[in-house]
Amino acid sequence: MELHFLGTGAGMPSKERNTSSLAFKLLEERGTIWLFDCGEATQHQILQTTIKPRKIEKIFITHLHGDHIFGLPGLLSSRSFLGGVDPLVLYGPKGLKEWVLCSLEISNTHLTYPLQFVEIEEGIIFEDDQFIVTVKQLEHVIPCYGYRIEQKPLLGELLIDKAKALGVPKGPLLGKLKHGEDVTLEDGTVVYSKDVTAPPKKGFVVTILGDTKYCDASRELSKDADIVEHEATFDHKTDHLASDYGHSTNMDAAKIANEASAKHLILNHISARFLPQDMEGIINEAKTIFPHVFVANDFSVFTLKQGKLVEVNEEL
């Protein structure tokens, strides 16, 4: 799992930051990418990465402000030109389907793949054998949602020496045991998977919050999360603006992470008023409340290594 930030600005693009978009890369887990928000020029940002649009399986939209959706029609169209044939599912607030289909119809854009829509309400909006995605409505000036992505427990490691001691030969039977299946040997002996595998490992939890004021829903979605990505449009000196515009400060984000007992916090959606030289101060302020704070920049890539959040460089 990697979080690859494509746009980390607030409201409009600047020289340092594009509008909102985050690629949640699940290439090892399921061979696909989930995209969260798709601000203007997201596909241009993708050109600077190794991300392949045809690998995008789902797009989750937090809300319908332009800096979070204006890149959608172009990306959907380009996914066709780039050979996309697999279905794509769009999740977002009511109105998303109407806006997207209207844009495609008026521009006479024809897609080469099925496009599905899920107009979301609070609760579980997606679940399979790997992941659960839960949403809650946040507090912004229009309906806006936060997403909690929970990876289900991973299969425990196969204790191959134990399996061999019980007479299991090399080959497909070991694979079945590893994947939780009991097997019967040639002599009729039944070997139970639970006896030759380690306990399941806890999966990761990542919370991705849309534009919001400090609120209970953010805290609930962030409970015990490994990573909380939280907007930080303003700082403590401009906190009066945060409330007026339905946004948060770096300190608000740190309070949420602290109160939710999260492990790591990534500050995102940074106002253009803050320059690169201001980031150290933004981080240090937040660290007075919560210790493990990072700031996302365009093209930042984060991953978990042995439970710790680290920033990595993508090799093009």
Image: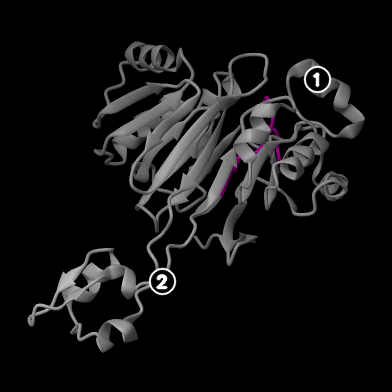
- Asked if residue 154 can be seen in this view, the reply is yes
Q: Quadrant of residue 154?
A: bottom left
Q: Residue furthest front?
A: 189
Left or right placement of residue 84 versus residue 65 in this view? left
- Asked if residue 43 can be seen in this view, the reply is no
- Say which of 82 and 300 sits in front: 300
Residue at horizontal 34 percent and vertical 42 percent from the top = 128
Q: What residue would you read off at disc 1?
A: 243
Amino acid type at image mark 1:
Ser
Left or right placement of residue 82 versus residue 259 in this view? left
Q: Quadrant of residue 28?
A: bottom left
Q: Residues within 10 Å of mark 2 (few under 14, many from 20)?
A: some
Left or right placement of residue 307 versus residue 250 in this view? left
As drawn, the label of residue 198 is 2
Q: Residues within 10 Å of mark 1 (few under 14, many from 20)?
A: some
- Say which of 41 and 142 sits in front: 142
Q: Residue 118, relative to residue 55: is it above or below? A: above
Given contact means CB atoms under 8 Å apart, are the residues at marks 2 and 1 in contact? no
Whole-percent x and y of residue 276? Answer: 80, 46
